[in-house]
Image: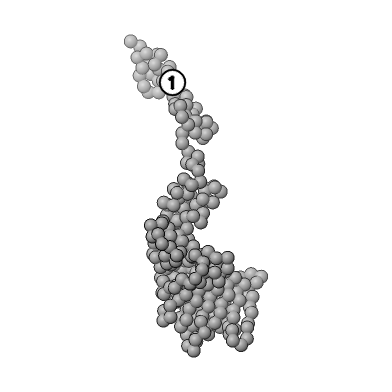
Amino acid sequence: MVLDRRDGIAFSDSRLATEFAEERRKLRRWIYSPASESGVDPYCHHPRRNINNLDDGCLMHIFSFLSPIPDRYNSALVCHRWNFLACHPHLWLRVDRSLRDLSLPRIFPNIETAVSAARPGDTILIADGGSHRVSNIQIRKPLCLIGAGQIPDDTVITCSRGSDSALEFTSTCKLSNLTVRAELGCCLLHRSGRLIVDGCLLQCETNPLDHLSYAIVSTASADSVSVSRTRIEGGSKAVLTSGTLTLQQVRVIYSRTSLLFWFNVGGDGDTTVQSSSGKLVVG
């Protein structure tokens, strides 16, 4: 008996050694050749399955199980198609006061339950029409709240009388295309994180004690508030802040009963206002 050693393996038959070497070369060619990238398997009669072969509906359903941060965010960086599907509005949470079927996924009857069920990085789409009543809703995770209407007036969030604020932020959040109304309190209370207000309307209702009303109150010292393309109405002061405030294309209506003051702050670029006294008076 003659032993043929190849690749450290002993064969008693040279024919078996030759066949083994040929199969090994074939496997190496498949691993290092472009054919492996196309999903063609020389050892299988069927092509290998690739996740990109799934249709958009299946991929979007898979993305819905991923946490928005960091998994879905990382998925959106893969390619243009994955970016479109991972950021699709169908994956957003929705608030609809007319909801009757509570079994529908990702749809909630009010803002408070939607915020409670949301995961960090989620986007909440608030249905237009009517008024969504809120009171001191605390947002402790990164979220984005968007109004579903054509303009901010279509989606109204009303703060119950006697509440300190409509929304209280202790994490980075963004508001867009929303109207927030408050009486004897503030529309937005910012404690920490970064607050971005874009394309909104903030209203402080007329009241004999409106000197206690502010559109935005920020108690954060190190973090910032950014306000852009936003209209602020009523209240004794537009913003009470102890940190840094960035304004861009903001219109402020100080007194609707007598004079109107129109401002276009930072029209050519951002304007940063640092208040040493802690009060920013506009009007």
> Residue 109, percent across and down?
42, 65
Left or right: 251 in relation to 21: right
Q: Residue at x 44, y 52 (%)?
A: 64
> Residue 65, percent across and down?
41, 51
Residue 112 visible in image: yes
- Give the residue type that dot 1 points to: Ala
Name the one closer to the observer, 225 or 158: 158
Q: Residue at x 51, y 68 (%)?
A: 129
Decide: few, some or many residues near mark 1? Use Cα within 10 Å; few <14, some 14-19, many ≥20.
Answer: some
Q: Circle 1 sits on which residue? A: 21
Q: Residue at x 41, y 75 (%)?
A: 135
Q: Measured along the vertical axis of the image, is residue 224 above or below residue 59?
A: below
| Label 1 element class | helix
| The residue positioned farthest toward the bottom in the image shown | 208
| The residue positioned farthest toward the top in the image shown | 1
> Residue 124, percent across and down?
47, 62
Name the one closer to the observer, 232 or 75: 232
Q: Residue at x 40, y 17 (%)?
A: 17
Name the one closer to the observer, 185 or 28: 185
Left or right: 240 in relation to 65: right
Left or right: 14 in relation to 145: left
